[in-house]
Image (cartoon, rainbow, N blue to C red):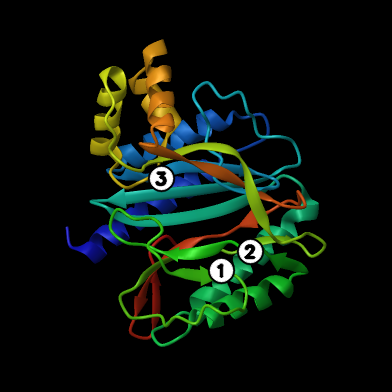
Amino acid sequence: MEPFEALREAGRIASKVRDTTLAEIEPGIKVEYICDLVNQRVAEMGGKMAFPCNVDIDHVAAHYCAPINDKTVIPERSLVKLDVGVHVDGYIADTAKTVSFDPSYDYLVEAATAGLDAAIQTIRPGVRANEIGAAIEDAIRSHGAKPIRNLTGHKLARYVVHAGKSIPNVNGHDRHLINEGDVYAIEPFAVPSTADGLVTDGPPSNIYRMQKRRSVKGTAKKMQKYIQAEYRTLPFASRWVMRKFSSDKGVEAFQELLYAKSIMSYPQLIESSHAKVAQAEHSVIVTEDGCEVTTA
């Protein structure tokens, strides 16, 4: 499949899975069920996971994924972000939406969505990244909220979710030029105007990535080989691996790979004042006079 066609197909799958799954989320549902449902639907539509499904609740802005046998459920009156990444032959679509179970926080969902819409209207060849950030920030602030200033959108490359360049969510110093043919995930995050508007590293997210092949033996060697073959440079969920290696030796092998720095862990990203966070995200291909949204 031609690269742009693969990007469009990944986007079609990601947006369909995002919307059908988001419609089923409600208080009391287990996060592990939601994550598994996303995996199942992506596979049924012919895609593969570009990264583990994130189900981020309230002040968790990003990177929460259910571990195996997770007991976490969606709370009442919560703000829930569903972040889905799909690839087709390594070509990635990354998208997210927020559902609010507390009407007093609906404006945060609207603010994040407005920021995303403003970015989509602004991005085109020759525009600088900080101009897009300014458009996002102005739109979010016009809804009585503020953006998280140390989270950004990111360039996408084949088998690489974060390919070096960023799209800021505020006006700032990132002045790199946008070029035709670039592929970006744009993802504004909105918080109340009284919040810090910053994220800090929290507990482990249950999301991992292959870092370097190490000299290990036994089950750890088999697990390392499996991870490298199955996920390459893309993030993966501990739950996926532990279901494949479902014994005490599997648990020990996973810890051995962590200790050897064969794999690395991502932290959850927590809003530093513990304010509730809304997120909106689309992936775009930069075109001659604007952009094509692949995840609409």
- Is the residue 94 above or below the residue 131 in the image? above
Amino acid tagged 1: Leu
User: Badge 1: few (under 14), some or many (20 or more) residues near its Cα, within 10 Å?
Assistant: many
Amino acid tagged 3: Phe
Left or right? Give the position of 205 relative to 292: right
Closer to us: 165 or 73: 165
User: In the structure shown, which secondary structural element does the residue marked by tag 3 occupy?
Assistant: strand
User: In the structure shown, which secondary structural element does the residue marked by tag 1 occupy?
Assistant: helix
Amino acid tagged 2: Ala
Single out the residue that lies furthest toward the top. 248
Q: Which mark is residue 51?
A: 3
- Asked where in the image residue 45 lies, by quadrant, the reply is top left
At a point 76% along the width and 41% down the height, the residue shown is 77
Q: Which residue is mark 2?
A: 112
Tell whether label 1 touches label 2 (CB within 8 Å): yes
User: In the structure shown, which secondary structural element does the residue marked by tag 2 occupy?
Assistant: helix
User: Badge 3: few (under 14), some or many (20 or more) residues near its Cα, within 10 Å?
Assistant: many
- Is the residue 69 above or below the residue 14 in the image? above
- Is the residue 115 above or below the residue 45 in the image? below
Closer to us: 81 or 222: 222
Residue 72 appears in view? yes
N-terminal label among 1 and 3 = 3
N-terminal label among 3 and 2 = 3
Q: Which residue is mark 1?
A: 116
Left or right? Give the position of 195 relative to 116: right
Left or right? Give the position of 87 relative to 266: left
x then y, percent, for residue 149: 64, 66
Residue 186 appears in view? no
- Asked where in the image residue 252 lies, by quadrant, the reply is top left
